[in-house]
Image: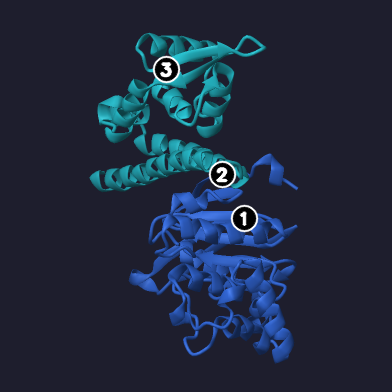
Chain colours: A blue, B cyan
Amino acid sequence: MTVVRLAEVSRVHGEGATAVHALKGVSLEVGEGELVAVKGPSGSGKSTLLNVAGGLERPTSGTVWIGEQDLAAVRDPAAFRRRGVGYVFQDLNLIPSLTAAENVMLPRELDGVRSRPAREEALAVLTEIGGEELADRFPDELSGGQRQRVAIARALVGERRLLLADEPTGALDTHAGDEILQILRARCDAGAAVLLVTHEPRYAAWADRVVFLRDGTVVDATEAPLASAR
Amino acid sequence: MSIRHGLLALLSRGPRHGYQLRVEFEASTGATWPLNIGQVYTTLSRMERDGLVEPGESDEQGRVVHTITTAGREELARWFSTPIVPSDRPRDELVIKLAMAVAAKEVDVADVIRRQRTATMRTLQQLTKAKRGATDGVARRLVLDSMIFRAEAEQRWLDHCEAVLKEER
C-alpha cells in the first residue's frame, strides 16, 4: 500500500526574477515496508522534497497524499504530522535540559498521552534501537552516534507509518552511520515507509529504490528489486 | 596478491589439507575469489619445492596435510609488512572508458555517467544487502566492506565527473 505519494509536485521559492524552482514536477511513491532514498548534490531539491512530502512546506503545484489523505485538505496539519510522520534531521534538535527518554516522550505528551504510558513507549522504542541504557542521560552526556539514535527514537515513537530522514547520518563515521541505517531498515521491514535523502552513496544503497535528483528533477532511478514488489 | 600468500596465511593457523584450504580461503574472502582445487594443489606443490610448506602423511582418505615451515612464516611476515603498490592492481576499465568518451567528442558523456551511476548504485545496493545478511565471520564482512567502499568511491567519482563536465560546457 502506498504511504506517501507525490504527483507532479513543483515548489518555487520566492517570486519573479529571483524565484528558485526547487522542485520541477516530481512524482514519487513510497509504499509500506519500502525504503526509498533520494540522492542528489546540495541544491538539487532534496530537502524541499522531504519537507513537501511531510507537509512542512506546501507545493506550489501538484498534490501530496499521505495514505488516502490529500495534505492540502488537512485541517490541523501539525497534529496530523505528529501522529503519522516522524522526522529525523541532520541537526538533531534534542532538547538539552531533557533526558533522552524525556526527549523521546515529548511528541506523545504533545498528543495528550499521559506521562507514565508515554515513558513506557519511549523506553520500548529506545530498547528497540539498542539504546535502553541511554534513557536517563542528557544529550551532552551522549556521543554523536548515541544522540542520533535518540533523535531517531523520537521520530519512531507512537504509531508513525512514515519516516522522513534528511541526511540522518550527518557527520557520523561510517560504522555509526551504518548502525543508523540498520535501525531505519529494521523499521521498514516492520512495515513503515521510509523516505531518506542523502548525498552519500553508501547510505542510499540501503534503500529498495534509489532516486537520483538533479536541479529539482528526477533524472534516474534504480528499479525496486523483485523481493519488495508486493 | 598471490594465492600462495593466502594459503600460507591459512596454514599459519595449523596444518591443513588442500580441500580444507580451498573452503577456508573462500569463506574468508566472501567467495569474491573462487579457487579451484587444481590451483590449490599446484600452489602447494610449488611452495613445497620452494621450502615454504612441507607435506605430512596422508590420512585414511589419502589426503595430504601440509604444514608451514620457518621459511614459509618468514615469507608470510614479509608479505604482511610490505604495502601494496598501485602497479599491483589492474587498470580500471571505467576510468579509461570515461576518458575516451571525453576524448571522442561526439559521445554524450553525461549519459555514459548517468547509466554507469545507476548501474553502480545497483551493485552497491546488492553489496549492502549481502552485508546485512553476512552474519558469519568478520573477514567476509570486511571483504564486503571493501567492495562497498570501492563502489562508493566510484559513485563519488562519477558525481565529481558530472559536476566538472557541467562547468566545462
Q: Which mark is residue A35?
A: 1
- Pick the residue in front: A58 or A80: A80
Indicate the chain on which mark 2 is placed. B
Q: Can residue A6 be seen in this view?
A: no
* Image mark for residue B53: 3
Q: Is mark 3 on a helix, strand or loop?
A: strand
Q: Residue A124's quadrant in the figure?
A: bottom right
Query: Tag 3, which chain?
Result: B
Disc 3 packing (10 Å; few <14; some 14–19; many ≥20): many
Specify the subunit that label 1 lies on: A
Q: What residue type is labelled 1?
A: Leu
Mark 2 lies on residue: B131
> The residue tagged with tag 1: helix, strand or loop?
strand
What residue is shown at x 71% (from left), y 81% (from top)?
A: A120
Query: Where the C terminus of chain B falls, by quadrant?
Result: top left
Q: Position of residue B132 (x, y in %)?
A: 59, 47
Graded by Cα atoms within 10 Å as few (under 14), some (14 to 19) or many (20 or more), the crowding at tag 2 reads some
Label 1 and label 3: CA atoms lie apart by: 51 Å
Query: Is residue A10 rendered to the left or right of residue B162?
Result: right
B99 relative to A117, above or below: above
> In terms of depth relative to the viewer, which is nearer, B162 or A10?
B162
Side of A8 where B103 appears, left or right: left
> How far apart are the alpha carbons under marks 3 and 2?
34 Å
* Residue B87 visible here: yes
